[in-house]
Image: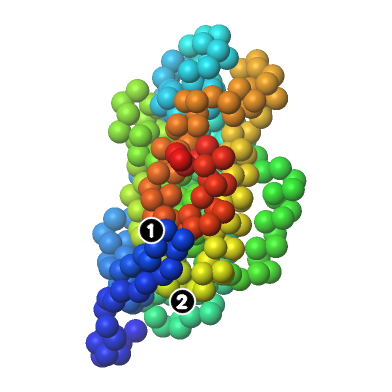
Amino acid sequence: MPPELLADRPKSWTARIRCKDGDHTLELTDREVVAERLLRTSRKHSFDPDVDVDWDAPQDPDVWYLPPQLVSLYETPLWDGLTHRQRVELTKREMCSIASFGIWSEMLLMQALVQHAYRRRYDSEHVAYALTEIADECRHSKMFGRMVRTCGLRTHRPRALEYHFAKLFGAVYDPMPMFAGTLVVEEFTDAFQRLTFPDENVQPMVRQVTRIHVVEEARHIKYAREELKRLVAHASPVRRRAAAYALAQGTRLMATQVIHPSCYEAVGLDPKLARRVAARSEHRRDTMAWAFRKCTAFFDEVGFLDGRARDVWVRAGLLKS
């Protein structure tokens, strides 16, 4: 957008939303200001995974693919019964399962971002950044797919119900749950990866992949947070609470699907038993609540933990009561 048009607008302002725990004040920033900053950062800090990842780095069979404390069965009797090599294999399988989930969710995000850009001014910085993010996500999906192949595995889709239900997203445009859902996925994976890429006990190739994703996803998170604040500021409390409740239920379901049952079969475990053990693990519940902590703190700020939504997050073990 031409600078002279942007100069006529306030660059920042505040808005109040009514929640059951009292009024919340949101600090809002003009879309064009946010987008211009993100575009500038993108020009300085973007990567090409084809050249910035050493895909030929040797994979030591005794080195983790994921910090073990992030594994779904960590600190359970099933974990204690595995050999070191089996534990390493489980970290590889779970890391690739998360990557497969990431590809699927990023495809949904790219589809939604195209819909969002389609409804905005095509010459705006806001749309320019949406297209930049789509390009980032294309590279990320290719990068995750190549990482899985390099590990000697194959990607997988979610269960048939979720896979086919998600096709409806292409027919419906609703930006508030779209941007909120983006934060759920990106904040969750970001938490795991921020623990992974600095860990010298993790495979070098995985560390390089997760570092790239963390650096570039920080911009995506900022874009989604700022847009969600603007949308919430203009939504009625009933509309906001309904969207927040639907998101909470979707997140509860998502959290159970990130780890594919084949991960457990690969190390000789009964997948049904392993999933039950993981679901009951206090360490796993603490890990998931930790991974979502930034997301839930932000949702609390913008009224997305208002009403029944908070109870769903707590019951699912994704938020400490």
Amino acid residing under circle 1: Glu
- Residue 77 x, y percent position in the rendering: 55, 12
User: Circle 1 — which element?
Assistant: helix
Q: Residue at x 26, y 78 (%)?
A: 11
Residue 165 is situated, as x and y percent measured from the top left of the image, at 72, 55
Dot 2 falls on a residue whose secondary structure is helix
Q: Is residue 223 visible?
A: no
How does the figure colour the protein chain or chains?
Answer: rainbow
Q: Residues within 10 Å of mark 1 (few under 14, many from 20)?
A: some
Q: Could you tell me how far apart the alpha carbons at marks 2 and 1 are, in whole angstroms?
A: 15 Å
Q: Is residue 103 left or right of residue 163?
A: left
The image's mark for residue 301 is 1
- Up-down: is 119 above or below 19? below
Horizontal and vertical percent position of residue 76: 53, 17
- Disc 2 marks which residue? 234
* Quarter assignment of residue 121: bottom left
Mark nearer the N terminus (2 vs 1): 2
Horizontal side of residue 191 vs 273, given as left or right: left
Which residue is more in the foreground, 47 or 9? 9
Q: Position of residue 35 (x, y in %)?
A: 34, 71
Quarter where residue 287 is shown: top left
Residue at image position (61%, 57%) is 246
Residue at 57 percent across and 47 percent down: it is 312
